[in-house]
Amino acid sequence: MNHRELDEMLMPLTDREIYHKNHGNISSFYNQLSQIDYEGKKIYLFNLANLLSGENITLSRHTRFAEVPMHIHDYIELSYVYSGKVTEIIKDKTITLKEGQVSIIDTGIPHSILPTTEKDIIINMLMRKEYFTTSFLSRLSTKGIISQFLVNAISDKTNHDNYIIFNSDNNEKMPNLIKELLCEYYDKSLFFNEIIDCYMILIFTELLKTFQYDTNKSLSNSKGTATVIDILNYLEENYMTCTLASTANHFNFHPNYLSSLIKKSTNKSFKELIQAQKLTRCSILLSNSNMPIYEIATEVGYQNLNFFYKKFKDYFGVTPNEFRHKYNS
């Protein structure tokens, strides 16, 4: 399947879409689903078994003209606006995504989708929670403390109260990656599972370049706002020189408040985040250079080599030598 054939498959209206266009929602479909009580309101529960066909990841096109009522699900949903736009109500916030943008909604997040038009093509990727404990997420989480934060936000280690909006509409690579993924999914070749995983790695890598993290919990102060991502991005760029005091001054926070905020948001202390970024930088140098290990340790500020070896093994589970050998192998 090529991109032209993909468009020809996605664009025409299905019988169900024609019915929705003429008659509105098919309420009987939702009447078959279970409902649960969420903060005193009855909402639908979309069950994994009813939607995923035995795969870790299932791709589908959203049914146009249909309104999806408030619901939660026990899988992770990535929505990509292939064309047009879509409006979602996530918790109590109305969000409109335009062509090229992506949302990831974790399990347990109440949300609904307003009716779309014929021009609005939305691709839904439904993924098992276990999919985010596979090797590709491990690879993503070694790219920095922002990547780790995002991975944790959609992993089974969190409280599952997050959603992420990616303003990826200006990313030139994303449309082609999504189309290649869809072509592979709808016209499976040999080793298609491995190929799909590779495309997902590429897609998530591009998303991490263009993301806007949004939990509807901006960190406000008297002179403006800063998000958790703003703070983590600052730490990634200034990890060799910044201190808690200098970072707090940069964002106009009191150091004690910033320290508490970081701990609450990331479950790590300021010192732990700086150390994680240093060790991540070491792992990149180990993987992509022939620098001696003592030079790598010195470059990121570890003067005591034994201390560096201990911290590296505590963080990655292997020594620097083992890490380099494993990566090269």
Image (cartoon, rainbow, N blue to C red):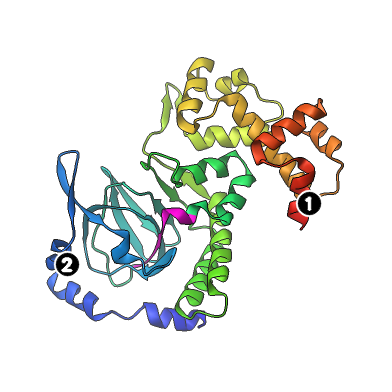
The correct choice, above or below, for 219 with respect to 146 in the image is above
Q: Is residue 245 magenta?
A: no
Q: Residue 127 sits in which quadrant?
A: bottom left
The correct choice, above or below, for 14 with respect to 83 in the image is below
**Residue with the mark numbered 1:** 325
Please state, as top left, top right, bottom left or bottom right, where the C terminus lies in the image. Answer: bottom right
Decide if residue 22 is on the left or right side of residue 218: left
Decide if residue 28 is on the left or right side of residue 216: left
Q: Tell me, yes or no, if residue 252 can be seen here.
A: no
Q: Nearer the viewer, mark 1 or mark 2?
A: 1
Q: What residue lies at 52% left-to-right and 21% top-to-bottom? A: 259
Decide if residue 68 is on the left or right side of residue 201: left
Q: Amino acid at mark 2?
A: Phe
Q: CA distance from mark 1 to mark 2?
A: 54 Å
Residue 291: mark? none
Q: How many numbered dots are placed on residues in this image?
A: 2
Q: What residue lies at 43% left-to-right and 56% top-to-bottom? A: 102
Residue 29: mark? 2
Q: Which residues are magenta?
A: 121-131
- Residue 189, given in percent of the width and then of the height, sits at 54, 80
